[in-house]
Amino acid sequence: MTFPIPLLRAVTLAIALLAGSAAAHEGHDHGDQAEAFPKAGSTPRLESISGPFELVALLQKGELVIYLDRFESNEPVVGATVTVETPAGSVAANAKEGAYRLSATWATAGSHDLIFTVTADDATEILTGVLKVAPDSPGAARSGGWSLFSPAIAQGIKDTFGSGGAVLMALFAFVAGLLAAGLLRARGKASLVILAASILALFAAGFAEAHEGHDHASEQAAQPTGELAQRFPDGALFVPKPVQRILAIRTTLTQVSTHRKSLELPGRIIPDPNASGFVQASVSGRLSPPEGGFPKLGTAVKAGDLLAFVTPPFQAIDVSDMRQKAGEHDQQIAIVERRIARYELLAKTGAVPKVTLDEAVLELKGLKERRASLDKTRGEPERLIAPVSGVIAAGNAVSGQIAETNAIVFQIIDPARLWVEALTFSLLPDAQSATARTSEGRRLTLAFQGAGLTDRSQAIPVHFAVVGDTKGLRVGQLVSVLAPTGEEAQGLAVPRTSILRAANGQTILFEHTTAERFEPRVVRVEPLDAERVLLLDGLQPGKRVVVQGAELLNQIR
């Protein structure tokens, strides 16, 4: 009967040493408290909505961090006055780093009712909420109890050794109890006591590992932890407010209204035919640059500027013919010169009329001009001149290149005067207010110029002039033309930036359901104009839809 008392001491001390880690197991309390506190590792938070404001408060490092946004647009509210009624009294929050902050030394484990008074833009709203703080939540004030194994150490041992971590903690605690009870100094039957107590401790550890018969890992995966954005199995997204600020998420509130339907047509940018032109050679010849070289792409030119020379080549037979003609001209010139000299002598005596002498002089002048023109034809190249003012949009000039008569040497366009050519399979009764959209999402305003009366590949070509700024547009660039059809429809209009393509090919958008939750909605749309689409199905009016940052949300995994 000597050993039961030391044995009892050892077991009691072991249970006491394990009590702290067991109480902190998985960081939550069971029963009613399981619903009262958030999961371990998640930041204590509350959400509240009132009037035009949406508020999220987080407990971080002993501070209450308040994120205040516009409910409809999710835009941060700047310059507001925020006062919070806390368990320690009324405290004014300070604006810092895009949020409002105040000290939260009162935030111990438990539930705390908070009242927020927000004043911004001559509007005052009162928002309320309950902040639930778990005993081991980040930023929570610590109070009461002690244990050889702190929750962090216990969780670290478990993460390192897996299911054997609990066994290791039990053995360590029991050995510590033996040392404290002085049982290791005992001899004889003490070994039986140690063995029996060890079996008891191992059994307790196994029970603690598998108690309540549920999987903690699945519970942990189902709850958002920390301040990381993540996607749930149903596709919904948890996006903390700090992450929303970084991604610049913006929303809009959908409303039913009447819209004019549009027809989406393929189109491309073309130059204005009245402000563009081609430079071509009238005869085949060899290209040569003018003084200063050929003009570069993008060079501004004026009508009449010299761009290149074309020297026509001469074959051997052509040279022989020209030499023969030159010899005939020279012979005729010599004959006429002698005739003129003889007429001048006879005209002095009156034997030859003055008119005959004048006619001979005129004949000599004409022969000399034809002779000079023949020499000029042999040596002077053709000058290629700019037909309009603009910039060099395309150039194929290379020194020494043989230019054919149908080859385009240069193309000149006016970048401020561009058109759009679209193809339609039906008449456009109201094409005056058409718009276009580039592949980058840029919107263009178009002015109707005319439609063709002949089909092109069973389509009707329609021309529009681009109104406004044309900077950055290129000739040949593909665009989508949205032309009104004259019909009207009622529905929800959302920006095209809201519409995404899911991994399974479905058309989706994100609805902002709560302050930090976004859910994908499968929708059916049709084009409305260059910036908006009409929702035909999949969303009810009065919902908040993400209009900026939707692509970034879709990448969250």
Image (cartoon, rainbow, N blue to C red):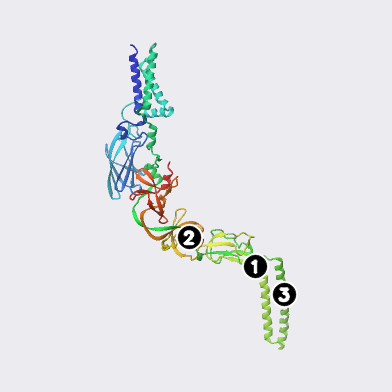
| Left-right relation of 444 to 330 | left
Type of amino acid at the residue the image marks with label 2: Leu
Label 1 element class: loop
Type of amino acid at the residue the image marks with label 3: Glu
Label 1: how many residues lie within 10 Å, few (<14), some (14-19) or many (20+)?
few
> Could you tell which of marks 2 and 3 lies nearer the N-terminus?
3
Type of amino acid at the residue the image marks with label 1: Glu
Q: Is residue 416 visible?
A: no
Picture coordinates of residue 291, whole percent (x, y): 60, 62
Q: Marks 1 and 3: which is nearer the front?
A: 3
What residue is shown with label 1? 380
What residue is shown with label 2? 423
Label 2 element class: strand
Q: Marks 1 and 2: which is nearer the front?
A: 2
In depth, the one of 291 and 261 nearer the eye is 261
Q: What residue do we see at 72% from left, 84% from top?
A: 343
